[in-house]
Amino acid sequence: MITIFHNNKCGKSRSAFNTLHEQSIDFQVVEYLKNPPNIEEIKTLLDKLSIKPIELIRTKEPIFIEKYKGKNFTDEEWINIMHENPILIERPILVSDNFAIIARSDEKIQEFITKL
């Protein structure tokens, strides 16, 4: 089963959602702003994405700029910050059983689909 971490207010997220729907791919939606991932779920996402926590942070979000920009945190601290402020989590994220991608382009989405 594919999961999309989705924010309907985000155009890139809506595009990924629509692409999965148009290609008749079965998927579940996690509206991560309404239902933030817990610490373990964030760690699992990071493992499947093969990235460091800071790479999953939306650095242009006002809350990042106001509270976190220019500060050094450990990976564990960044994970806690994302859990407490899910708006900072990059989107959309497509997740399969074995891997995940940050699906900000049609090419990335198609690449993800071909790996299924």
Image: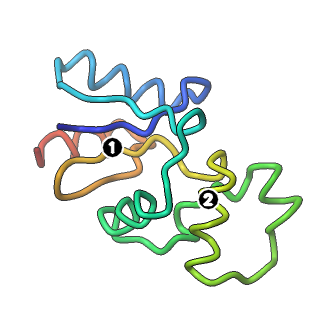
Kindly identify the amino acid type of the residue bearing the numbered disc 2.
Answer: Met
Q: x%, y% of residue 63? A: 81, 53
Which of the pair 96/61 is nearer the observer? 96
Residue drawn at point x = 34 percent, y = 70 percent: 50
Q: Which mark is residue 82?
A: 2
Q: x%, y% of residue 77? A: 64, 76
Residue drawn at point x = 49 percent, y = 63 percent: 39
Q: Quadrant of the C terminus?
A: top left
Q: Is residue 35 left or right of residue 23?
A: right
Q: Is residue 78 left or right of residue 100?
A: right
Kindly identify the amino acid type of the residue bearing the numbered disc 1.
Answer: Leu
Q: x%, y% of residue 24? A: 17, 18
Residue drawn at point x = 23 percent, y = 38 percent: 2
Neighbour tally class for label 2: few under 14, some 14-19, many 20 plus, Cα within 10 Å: many
Neighbour tally class for label 1: few under 14, some 14-19, many 20 plus, Cα within 10 Å: many
Q: Is residue 81 left or right of residue 62?
A: left
Q: Which mark is residue 94?
A: 1
User: How far apart in space, not on screen, are marks 2 and 1 (Cα)?
Assistant: 17 Å
Can you name the residue that lies furthest to the right here? Answer: 66
Q: x%, y% of residue 89? A: 57, 52
Which of the pair 57/33 is nearer the observer? 33
